[in-house]
Amino acid sequence: MRGLANYAMRGPKQALFMAVLFASIPMLFWLSSAIIALVILRRGIDHGLKVLMWALLPAIGWAAAGQFNVLTGLLATTLLACTLRQTVSWPKTLLALVPVGGAIALSLFQLAPQQIALLSEAVMSLLVKILPEQGAKSTVDIGTQLKPLVEYGVIGMLAWFTLVSGVLSLVLARAWQSVLYNPGGFGNEFRRVILPPVASIVLLALTLGGSALSPVLTALIPIASLPLFIAGIALVHGLVNLKQLGSFWLVGMYMLLILVTQLAYPVIVLTACFDSVFDFRRRAANRIAQNGPK
């Protein structure tokens, strides 16, 4: 991976070639996004947008064929990279996930109604099967009530997956930049990521009660949870580093995320919200300064 980043940074032609090449392969478009983000972070927004313009050509071609993930992934990563470049702040960049995700959800609603309808029908058929048997009429009524929530939920999850790929591409680009020009810098800054308390509370409230306010806000539930989730991951990395616990704990966390996602994800989101108020890393650092690592 370092060799790929080093080659892309040799000059504009190399970066453009690699970005277009990987954008032409749907399964590897995240590498194209990472290269564009690296150019933005290192050389500036103008240079990155020039590379993006060329990478959009195959992305538009895939969108015409019905695959919008390349196009939305490139645009999402570019917007996040521009935010990080301008603000030099991971918390502000994470908060930018919400408007970016909302724009992605709206664009998917307009551009891919058939795909959304198919996925919604698949989810609805699964829900109808697991609904309690209260009679056919009751099941139909419940299904009718759930349909708008399911449709907006599907849109939100599609936007969530796009945002996750965008964040991972941005993280990869920042890690490349750190390895090439500032060894160790990315790890230190990521372990310090913490969201503002008010923003965290608003995001958590939207995550827990968005669908109760309006079915449309159901699309924002997974989107609003993502900044908290990433901040929670940063919290775990920070505490493990402060207490010198070793990589075993990080491996364990990621294994739990894979094996019991439905349990681990909300726990990390809630923990990140509490951390924004109580700042667990500062408290741990103060305790370690008094008593030493345990």
Image (spheres, grey):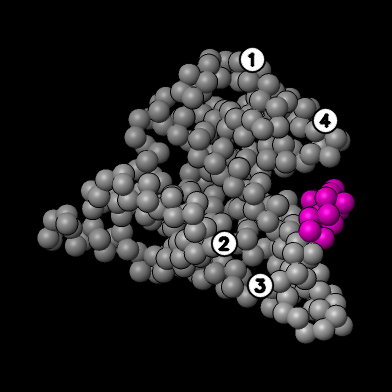
Q: Is residue 241 above or below residue 125?
A: above
Residue placed furthest toward the left: 291
Asked which secondary structure carries label 4, the reply is: helix
Residue annotated with mark 1: 13
Q: Give the main secondary structure of the magenta stretch.
A: helix
In the image, what residue type sits under mark 3?
A: Gly
Asked which secondary structure carries label 1, the reply is: helix
Q: In which quarter of the image is residue 148?
A: bottom right
Instruction: Tell me the CA gap for discs 4 and 2.
Output: 32 Å
* Residue 109: in magenta span: yes
Residue annotated with mark 4: 61
Left or right for 214, reference 241? right
Left or right for 140, reference 78? right
Residues at badges 1 and 3 in contact (C-beta under 8 Å)? Answer: no
Give the magenta range.
Answer: 106-122
In the image, what residue type sits under mark 4?
A: Gly
Disc 2: CA contacts within 10 A as few (<14), some (14-19) or many (>=20): many
Q: Is residue 99 above or below residue 27?
A: below
Instruction: Tell me the CA gap for discs 1 and 3.
Output: 46 Å
Disc 4: CA contacts within 10 A as few (<14), some (14-19) or many (>=20): some
Q: Which mark is residue 56?
A: none
Q: Which of marks 3 and 4 is nearer the N terminus?
A: 4
Residue annotated with mark 3: 210
Q: Residue 205, image x and y in percent?
A: 57, 73
